[in-house]
Amino acid sequence: MWFGENKIIKKLSLIFISLFIIISGLIATSSSMNPMSEYYRGWYDFKSGQVHCFDKLVCLHELVHEYDWESGKKQISETPKFKTAVANYYKSIMDKEEKTWLEEYIYTFPGVGGEYLDYGVGGWGGFGELYAEIFSASFLRGLDIPKEFEQFYDKKIILERWEKYPNFKSRW
């Protein structure tokens, strides 16, 4: 055995363990932004018109995005009419001491009443994200869509697509 070989092995072991810990941390951190991670179990690819989802509940949200993008040249969620409805709804509930679950959700939604968060770090995806959330959160909790927003959705079309969605797996 060479003189000092034991020290070299110990140093190399420490280097490999340190690298393993660093790489594991990077993988864990980046997985939170990975579309396949637990946080993102679905998405709508507006370029291809494809819905990708791995969970029945997430599929509804993504199908609302699909409906939003199919509405014509401009997304419903990006129209001045929808944005005005959001602003008016916010004003109508802002002074209420006790809000319903949905009112509180919309009131504190990032970028509406809550702090704006960068989309790349799990934050707000704009009015399109709020548009999908209003419908899916209302329906999945057995609540009516607030009357201010009913005109922006065709519940029948969206729910028919949801029922027909093939086994709630990716459609690509």
Image (spheres, grey):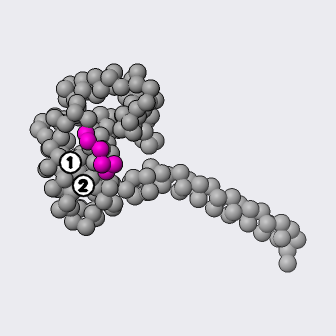
SS at mark 2?
strand
Q: Quadrant of residue 80?
A: top left
Q: Marks 2 and 1: CB-CB under 8 Å?
A: yes
Q: Residue at x 25, y 39 (%)?
A: 145
| Nearer to the camera, 3 or 143 | 143
Residue at x 83% of width, y 70% of height: 6
Q: Is residue 109 left or right of residue 16?
A: left
User: What segment is highlighted magenta in the picture?
Assistant: 140-145
- In the picture shown, does residue 159 fall above or below 101? below
Residue at the far front in the pictured view? 98
Looking at this view, is 49 or 132 the one in front? 132
CA gap, disc 2 to disc 1?
7 Å
Quadrant location of the N terminus in the rendered image: bottom right
Tag 2: residue type? Val
Q: Is residue 62 a member of the stretch shown in magenta?
A: no
Is residue 51 visible from the viewing direction of this image?
yes
The residue tagged 2 is 51
Q: Position of residue 28 (x, y in %)?
A: 54, 55
Q: Position of residue 156 (x, y in %)?
A: 14, 49
Q: Is residue 6 left or right of residue 158?
A: right
Q: Nearer the viewer, residue 92 or 126?
A: 92
Circle 1 residue: 66
- Chief SS of the magenta region: loop
Q: Is residue 141 magenta?
A: yes
**Residue lying furthest bottom:** 1
Residue 30 placed where, x, y %? 49, 52
Residue type pointed to by label 1: Glu
